[in-house]
Amino acid sequence: MNMPERSSLDIRQPLLDSVLAGLIALVVFGPIVGVVLDGYGFNLQPARVAWIVGTVMLGRFLLSLFLHSVIGRGWLQRLDGGGAGVQVLAPDYRSRLRWIVPLVLLAAVVLPFFANKYLLTVVILGLIYVLLGLGLNIVVGLAGLLDLGYVAFYAIGAYGLALGYEYLGLGFWSVLPLAALTAALAGALLGFPVLRMHGDYLAIVTLGFGEIIRLVLNNWLSLTGGPNGMSVPAPTFLGLEFGRRAKDGGVPFHEFFGIAYDPNLKFLFIYAVLLLTVLLVLYVKGRLIRMPIGRAWEALREDEIACRAMGLNHVLVKLSAFMLGASTAGLAGVFFASYQGFVNPTSFTFFESALILAIVVLGGMGSTLGVVLAAFVLTVAPELLRSFADYRVLLFGMLMVLMMIWRPRGLIRISRRGFAQRPGVAP
Amino acid sequence: MDGIFLQQLINGLTLGSVYGLIAIGYTMVYGIIGMINFAHGEVYMISAYLSAIGLSLLTFFGLESFPLLIFGTLLFTVCVTGLYGWTIERIAYRPLRNSTRLAPLISAIGISLILQNYVQLSQGARQQGIPTLLDGAFRFHVGEGFLQISYTKVFILVAAFAGMAALTWVIHCTRLGRMCRATQQDRKMAQILGIDTDRVISWVFVIGAAMAALAGLLITLNYGTFDFYAGFVIGIKAFTAAVLGGIGSLPGAMLGGLILGVAEAQFSGMVNTDYKDVFSFSLLVLILIFRPQGLLGRPQVTKV
Amino acid sequence: MKDDEILSVEHLSMQFGGIRALHDVSLGVKRHSITALIGPNGAGKTTVFNCLTGFYRASGGSIRLNARGRSTDVLQVLGGPFRAGDFVNPRRFASRLRYKLFGGTHLVNRAGLARTFQNIRLFREMSVLENLLVAQHLWVERNLLAGILNTRGFRRAEEQALEHAFYWLEAVDLADCANRLAGELSYGQQRRLEIARAMCTRPQLLCLDEPAAGLNPAETAALSRIIRTLRDAHEVTVLLIEHDMGLVMGISDHILVLDHGELIAEGPPAAIRHDPKVIAAYLGADEEELA
């Protein structure tokens, strides 16, 4: 084979690929994008089809060209290598990103002094999703269980506060631990029967469970107010309220401390408590991966049969991850409810579960720092780019597919802890 | 009482036969690659849109007779939806064949989000509909009341069973069906014997999508309305049907669909319509707890 | 039940659907012995193994494990189906329910039996040491609070687990691989790591499923040394399936021969070597010739 022939082949193949992709795109996208139903008639939109087909052809052409090039081939081979990307660190390894932790902490402490209400609420929302992402990360990233109804536990926390206030007169502080417990209990009831089966079933059962919870909240008008939702009390600090005037003749927070009334006080308070909770959860998660239970989760993800042969009760070990994840979502729900001041079922749709999953996927399954970053990127970015909001779900979807193809483990390389050599001691 | 029962039985059977059609997609894909196709509900939703688009295009070109209209729409819907099935497999499953077990699940969920949002963006979020094509009904007197079976329902039952019969024929009597069954039994061995298993898997996705397309057309004929969110709930229900019948088993999917449809219709007739989805989902959980292998499935032996 | 038997199996049978994989297999494994289970391909060796280690629930018969100072009924801890008698006797009902909810293969391991797998099952993306730490799950400090607060007791327990892990790594000659990924090791190293991992669960009966498969002669020799040391220095009983007759004849005290799901011969290596039934089973002689 001589040189010119080979180079002409190189261009023909991408062209062929691109034409084929264009044809498929025409058939697939043509009817839905080009023929918009309008009553029993329709409007034609050929321009949109042309755009999409053009984009697909161009994209396929470039991809094909790239994959035929030398760099692309090497890249493909690396992709096929599999298993790569995990490394064991040296026993005395210290992360080069250590300086980032105090910096972020400092920023978090300083933020309330400079932030206006809008920024504060955006950051609170971001932190709530950090909490949710961390919780789901335990379930999906560490234990390898796909929970698609994660939002159900979030709803349990949020409605726990609303219902607890309405019917039992409970406040923020008493509901916080109760919500975590209730969510964990619900997780146990759901997980115990399902976790002994093939992993995929868990995904679909949790999907169904999330939908059940939403439907019940939506339809049980007498208890939950249905689609109209329920109002939620503002949190208090040692019984002091954050309103301008306290109810029942109490003393409001600002009068008690003799400071000027600030309508942001409620959000500042939520921010402070939420930040502490997130730090606590971060710490606990950091410990968990160094504890026997964390190792057992990861081992179960790797090989369930081998775990059973080593005396691990696979159902209970998985259940513990599932319950811990659920209780974190319960906590997040309480914060969400008091932040928003009311709850209704539209906050707890499947899209919410998908968003949290996208956070975990983008952040890297099993990576803590990645999840924190991803939570902020995925929740704060759409807030700032409002015009983008319509395409949000589309982007999440593409992100999940691309991340899975490109790097099934997420953006950040997972590294395992190393231990120093020591002499063995007989049992 | 009897009238209502019979009426709901008929409604349930029609609904159930359609669930069965969608469940086939789940069951075949699970049988061959051991994974749940999470985007399958969305494939059904797409096919509902496609059938409405096909109908309005054909009427626009002056096609009036019912059989031609239905046949043309069916052909259009099945072909395009089948291509959707193929594309989904190509994008979300094939690149991940040697990846971790969780990866294809997540990418399939990504695809299902993409499809939902893309239909919403291009067709709008509002409910869409088609006009009634088949008017009239059979009426029978039963006791005090009477029983009404619309021609549409009769057509759905006939079409659904014809579709299932055709599929059974394909699986049992054609070369493709034989290759499917071989790949399901042992993918590696099939590969060694010269079967292009990648192509077989693609075909299974296409066949599943085609069955969902038939279901999409039939449901649209019956209810007349649909929206971009329709695939989610029906997807879970069809999956319930597949599990109920025993996942991996074709007759099981059909049987499970019929049972689920009848149970759901009786529940909404006798208890409450608001909670009929809750009822179906709870049924799924209960089946998984007490009989995970389903009615016609075989209990799995873990290979050590 | 004899006292010197760590494992006694009586009338074991196993059916998959209509296929009879095992029929009326009775065998005993003497304490502190090395016992080998051999037989031609498809004889049912792995099925026996999976029944003994609790991965399959046998269709009939009984399996008793006498280790860690107690006697365990393997079929019972797996959580068998309810029987009519359970519903009249509340205590039996409670025990059946308990094992149905929380029973399973792991209880067999907790009763003092550890195993390896024919197609190696390591936690490939965890480090070698972590593999061994997971195996010690039941022997470390599992209290959540102690772990989260990182108490002194927790740190001491972790340190002991690490020392113990290094002990077994040295025993199988892998100490310099401690901080490598398990999936990166060579085939022979992985086989040895699997033995070390099984030993970390502190068993009294170790079941090895084709430990020499895929090893070269030098590695096989090292393996047979390791197996002997396990028995002599650590008081472990070893039961193994193996095709390498050199290894089997060299280290076994007792050999069990399985063919077509039935036990056709048992005895010391010398007797098995010349048993006409065994030779026939391996060479495929006709039934008439035997009789």
Image: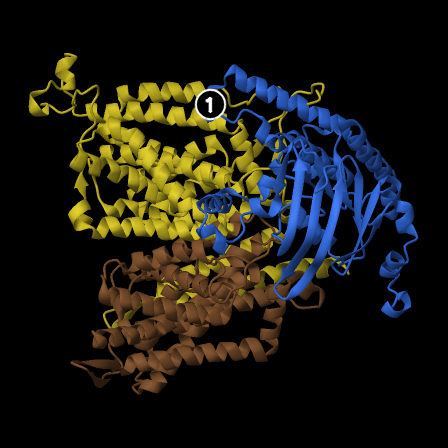
Asked whether C36 or C116 is in front, the reply is: C36
How far across and down, in percent of the image, does residue A375 sit? Answer: 39, 36
Number of other residues with Cα within 10 Å of mark 1, as a class: few under 14, some 14 to 19, many 20 or more? some
Chain A rendering hue: yellow
Residue A112 visible in image:
yes
Q: Which chain is brown?
A: B
Q: Which chain is blue?
A: C
Q: Give left or right: position of B218 versus C218.
A: left
At 30% from the left and 34% from the top, the residue drawn is A179
At 47% from the left and 62% from the top, the residue drawn is B294
Asked whether C57 or B7 is in front, the reply is: C57
Asked whether C7 or B118 is in front, the reply is: C7
How far across and down, in percent of the image, does residue C110 sit? Answer: 60, 36
The residue singled out by tag 1 in the image is C148
Residue furthest to the left: A249
Q: Specify the quadrant that holds the N terminus of chain C.
A: top right
Q: Give left or right: position of A107 versus C95.
A: left
Residue B216 picture quarter:
bottom left
Tell me the kind of residue under disc 1.
Ile
Q: Give left or right: position of A142 versus B8.
A: right
Using the image, name the chain to which the residue with label 1 belongs. C
